[in-house]
Amino acid sequence: MTEKPQITQPEAKLLSILQRDASASVADLAEATHASAATVWRRIRALEERGVIGPPVRLVDPAQVGRGMDVYCQVRMKSQDAEARAAFQRAIDAEPAIMEVYSVTGEWDYMLHMVVRDIADFESILMRRLLELDCVAGTSTIFALRRIKHTREVPL
């Protein structure tokens, strides 16, 4: 069983704020958490060093940049040997439209989440990135009709 990292209550409050707005200033964070700016800065650095948080980023709305279609593609592998997994990893790393990849249990081996322009864009990725791989046995695709809930905020 994986041991749960210990997050203190002040760290949890700080993380909750940062997940909603990574651009919040240290002064604003200090005020919201009732701590000094120096304490908040030290907590943030400690959370980074422990790997709890990564660098701040700005989230882009895919639809606003012409990638308004969410596609979920399940992949079944012919083989799970190291060479096949490495070839698959290289292929998915080379395709920027593939946003997330999960190794999953059940009938399929991987679940990919892509943001694409349209069905033709997805078809191109499917044909040139996935189905051309010797290690891929097959795929199944789900097209999302609409995003109803989408968050990056981890419950604490």
Image (tube, rainbow, N blue to C red):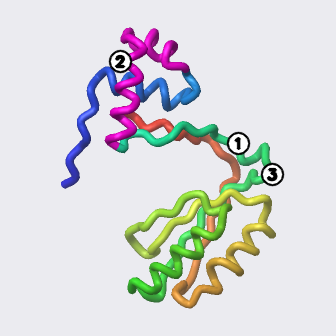
Q: Which residues are magenta?
A: 25-50
Front in this rendered view, residue 108 or 58: 58
Mark positioned earlier in the residue sequence (2 or 1): 2
Q: Secondary structure at mark 2?
A: helix
| Residue 26 colored in magenta in the image | yes
Q: Secondary structure at mark 1?
A: loop
Q: CA distance from mark 3 to mark 1?
A: 9 Å
Q: Position of residue 51 (x, y in %)?
A: 36, 44
The residue at the point 54 percent across, 70 percent down is: 74
Q: CA distance from mark 3 to mark 2?
A: 42 Å
Q: Which mark is residue 61?
A: 1
The residue at the point 70 percent across, 53 percent down is: 145
Residue indicated by mark 3: 66
Mark positioned earlier in the residue sequence (3 or 2): 2
Residue indicated by mark 2: 39
Q: Amino acid at mark 1?
A: Asp
Q: Main secondary structure of the magenta part?
A: helix
Q: Nearer the viewer, mark 3 or mark 2?
A: 2
- Horizontal relation, residue 120 to residue 113: left or right: right
Image: 3 above or below 142: above
| Res 72 quadrant in image | bottom right
Front in this rendered view, residue 119 or 103: 103
Front in this rendered view, residue 41 or 84: 41
Q: Amino acid at mark 3?
A: Gly
Q: Position of residue 10 (x, y in %)?
A: 32, 21
Quick one: quadrant of the N terminus? bottom left
Q: Are marks 3 and 2 in contact (CB under 8 Å)?
A: no
